[in-house]
Amino acid sequence: MTGLPGLPLTFTTGQARAAGVHPRDLYAARDDGELVELSRGVFRRADAPAAAYPDLLAVSLRAPRAVVCLLSAAAVHDLTDEIPMAVQIAIPRRTWPPKIDYPPVEVFVWNPLTFELGLESVEVAPGEWARIYSPGRTVVDLMHMRHKLGDSVAHVAVRRYLARRDARVADLMTYAKALDVLGPVRAVVDVLAAS
């Protein structure tokens, strides 16, 4: 691609400016079909390999400190059949929430003391990563938010997690204790183990 040297496959307007690309040239490349605008100020080269999770890719560049959570994380980890209506992200309390119009985003504010617990990365496009909570942490978060997202979503996630080869009940209990939902998580795990 001519005129955009040294930029990664997906980049922000700020990165383009730092590389010496004038905004006029950036938007001309978008209008000519050389770039796809994933979100306001987030561009991806049109000749780049397809992104597995383009919405997560866009949000991760717009809000780099945020972590993909709840239903969005459950969908990535195959813990639900629900299709989230918005990318659900967590930010630590006392952090300004990002203002993202597209893709739709739902922001949850988590306790800073447990914010990093169960943090992983997922490859959202070849060689590009986004922060996401682990499958175990996602299950516990869904149990914690079951009053808002529904008991059935949380119970399906627990069942699917326990059926995985890499399931670790000890991790679930550690996360549940830290997030103050040990009783409900233990009760669901006990019921599913008995059936």
Image: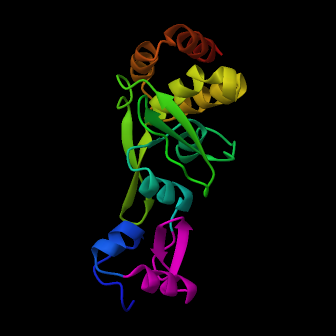
143 relative position to 61: left or right = right
Residue at the image point whose x is 43% and y is 79% from the top = 23
**Looking at the picture, how far across and down is residue 70, in whole percent?**
56, 35
Identify the magenta region. 22-50
* Residue 49 lies in the magenta stretch: yes
**Residue 137: x percent and y percent?**
46, 29
In the displayed structure, 73 sits above or below 148; it is: below
Lateral position of residue 150 relative to residue 162, left or right? right
Looking at the rendered image, the quarter that the C terminus falls into is top right
Q: Is residue 92 above or below residue 99?
A: above
12 relative to 155 in the view: left or right: left
Q: Residue 163 lies in magenta, yes or no?
A: no
Residue at 38 percent of width and 32 percent of height: 118
x, y percent for residue 71: 60, 39
At 42% from the left and 26% from the top, the residue drawn is 168
> Percent position (x, y) of residue 96?
45, 39
Instruction: Please state if 108 lies on the left or on the right of 125 as rendered.
Output: right
Q: Is residue 78 visible?
A: no
In this picture the colour scheme is rainbow
- Residue 20: quarter of image: bottom left
> Can you say which quadrant of the picture contains the N terminus?
bottom left
